[in-house]
């Protein structure tokens, strides 16, 4: 994953974005705040990261990663959707390098 590629795509998405629409990107470790740097306030409130594990059809875990300006109301609404409609087990991760599961995985591989 490349931060600059995601930033460029999100800048294009913002041009068509309508207020009230949730925007998310699937990432396994790119900074959520870095991706929306330079976007308008309302867009940043509506943006968060998701980390669906592969293959998503079979893997239950989903990390949701809010940025520092993300609306927690939207995160909670998406969490309910992911749990009830997608059947996912959701964890809310901090916007730290590699979030939760990948950090645990790397630690496990090093042991």
Image (cartoon, rainbow, N blue to C red):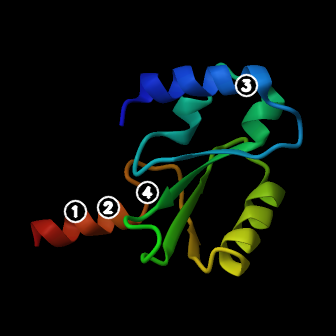
Depth check, mark 3 against mark 2: the one in front is 3
As measured in the structure, the alpha-carbon distance from the residue carrying label 4 to the one carrying label 1 is 11 Å
As measured in the structure, the alpha-carbon distance from the residue carrying label 3 to the one carrying label 2 is 31 Å
Q: Is residue 82 shown left or right of residue 34?
A: right
Instruction: Indicate the position of residue 60 as horizontal and vertical percent values.
Output: 48, 78
As measured in the structure, the alpha-carbon distance from the residue carrying label 2 to the one carrying label 1 is 5 Å
Q: Mark 2 = which residue?
A: 103
Q: Vertical placement of 87 versus 57: above or below?
A: below
Q: Is residue 89 shown left or right of residue 38?
A: left
Quadrant (top left, top right, bottom left, bottom right) of the N terminus: top left
Q: Is residue 69 shown left or right of residue 10?
A: right
Specify the label residue 14 is tagged with: 3
Q: For the view shown, which residue lies furthest in the front direction?
A: 57
Instruction: Indicate the position of residue 27 as horizontal and vertical percent values.
Output: 46, 48
- Toward which corner of the image does residue 84 lie, by quadrant? bottom right
Q: Mark 4 = which residue?
A: 99
Q: Quick one: SS at disc 2? A: helix
Q: Mark 1 = which residue?
A: 106
As measured in the structure, the alpha-carbon distance from the residue carrying label 1 to the one carrying label 3 is 34 Å
- Toward which corner of the image does residue 72 lie, by quadrant? bottom right
Q: Vertical placement of 4 versus 81: above or below?
A: above
Is there a contact, CB below 8 Å, between mark 2 and mark 1?
yes
As measured in the structure, the alpha-carbon distance from the residue carrying label 2 to the one carrying label 4 is 6 Å
- At 65% across and 20% down in the image, what residue appears? 12
């Amino acid at each position: 994953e490349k931060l600059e590629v995601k930033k460029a795509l999100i800048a294009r998405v913002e041009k068509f974005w309508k207020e009230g629409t949730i925007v998310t990107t699937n990432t396994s470790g790119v900074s959520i705040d870095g991706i929306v740097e330079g976007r308008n306030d309302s867009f940043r409130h509506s943006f968060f990261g998701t980390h669906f594990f592969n293959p998503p059809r079979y893997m239950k875990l989903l990390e949701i990663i809010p940025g520092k300006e993300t609306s927690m109301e939207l995160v909670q609404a998406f969490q309910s959707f992911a749990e009830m409609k997608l059947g996912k087990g959701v964890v809310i991760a901090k916007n730290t390098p590699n979030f939760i599961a990948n950090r645990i995985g790397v630690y496990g591989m090093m042991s």
